[in-house]
């Protein structure tokens, strides 16, 4: 089943289970984020990707983009957190596609602002074979133009459905949450060529929309294609 069909099924189920007045808050937050123009500020194909050094949740080791790119092209997936069913579904899809990535000589990392402890839970629960890297305060995501702060109205929505983003991101409660603990990235997917140039880029203000993995694999195929003589 195409990834977007799986995500649309989550949306349909949510609309059955969540009260209409609560859903309206979330729908408005998505619309406000789109109208902010954030999508227009994200990094695009042909631009240089920021280098990074981030902690791998499973090993506690620093993972450097320069080291990964020395081995092959790199798929970088920014996601919101383990509390997001859309993110879980997308990462599980990429779990199944690891043989396709290896066949293309590519590596894959997933990056979020959640704590290493939360990412480690996610790795174990969903048997994820790739690194989940910690980006505290979504600072790297900001360099890609992806970061935003959850609006007060949507914070109340998340609280009403028992999603504690400050705890997931920084181990904080609603009462002592900082603004940084409410920062999230747009879900986004990048393919980086070995020189660090962005070869594929897709990010959406609507968290329910994600690129099909097939499009990402096509971008990797294009990188591996022989240069015209």
Image (cartoon, rainbow, N blue to C red):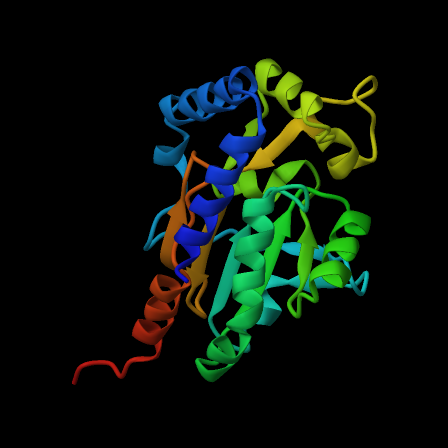
Total of numbered circles in the picture? 0
Q: Is residue 158 above or below residue 82?
A: above
Q: Is residue 150 visible?
A: yes
Q: Residue at x 64, y 20 (%)?
A: 155
Q: Residue at x 77, y 45 (%)?
A: 115
Residue 61 is situated, as x and y percent measured from the top left of the image, at 78, 63
Q: Residue at x 75, y 38 (%)?
A: 168
Direction front: furthest residue: 16
In terms of image quadrants, where is residue 60?
bottom right
Quarter of the image with the C terminus is bottom left
In terms of image quadrants, where is residue 132?
bottom right
Q: Does residue 55 appear to the left or right of 226 in the view shown?
A: right
Residue 228 is situated, as x and y percent measured from the top left of the image, at 18, 81
Quarter of the image with the N terminus is bottom left
Residue 189 is situated, as x and y percent measured from the top left of the image, at 46, 53
Q: Does residue 37 appear to the left or right of 132 in the view shown?
A: left
Looking at the picture, tell me which residue is in the foreground, 177 or 139.
177
Residue 65 is situated, as x and y percent measured from the top left of the image, at 59, 62
Q: Residue at x 79, y 33 (%)?
A: 167
Q: Is residue 163 above or below residue 176?
A: below
Direction left: furthest residue: 229
Q: Is residue 48 visible?
A: no
Q: Is residue 158 above or below residue 10?
A: above
In terms of image quadrants, where is residue 204?
top left
Q: Does residue 146 appear to the left or right of 117 in the view shown?
A: left
């Amino acid at each position: 089943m195409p990834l977007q069909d799986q995500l649309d099924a989550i949306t349909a189920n949510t609309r059955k289970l969540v009260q209409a007045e609560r859903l309206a808050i979330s729908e408005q937050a998505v619309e406000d984020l789109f109208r902010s123009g954030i999508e227009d500020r994200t990094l695009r194909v042909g631009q240089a990707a920021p280098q990074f050094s981030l902690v791998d949740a499973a090993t506690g080791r620093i993972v450097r983009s320069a080291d990964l790119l020395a081995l092959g092209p790199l798929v970088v997936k920014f996601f919101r957190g383990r509390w997001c069913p859309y993110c879980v579904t997308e990462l599980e899809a990429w779990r199944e596609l690891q043989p396709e990535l290896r066949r293309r000589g590519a590596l894959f990392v997933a990056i979020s602002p959640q704590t290493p402890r939360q990412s480690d839970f996610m790795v174990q629960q969903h048997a994820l074979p790739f690194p989940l890297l910690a980006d505290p305060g979504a600072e790297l995501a900001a360099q890609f133009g992806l970061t935003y702060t959850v609006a007060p109205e949507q914070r109340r929505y998340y609280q009403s459905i028992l999603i504690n983003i400050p705890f997931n991101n920084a181990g904080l409660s609603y009462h002592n949450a900082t603004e940084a603990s409410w920062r999230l990235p747009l879900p986004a997917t990048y393919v980086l060529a070995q020189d660090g140039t962005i070869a594929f880029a897709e990010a959406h203000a609507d968290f329910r929309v994600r690129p099909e993995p097939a499009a990402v694999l096509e971008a990797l195929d294009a990188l591996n294609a022989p240069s015209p003589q």
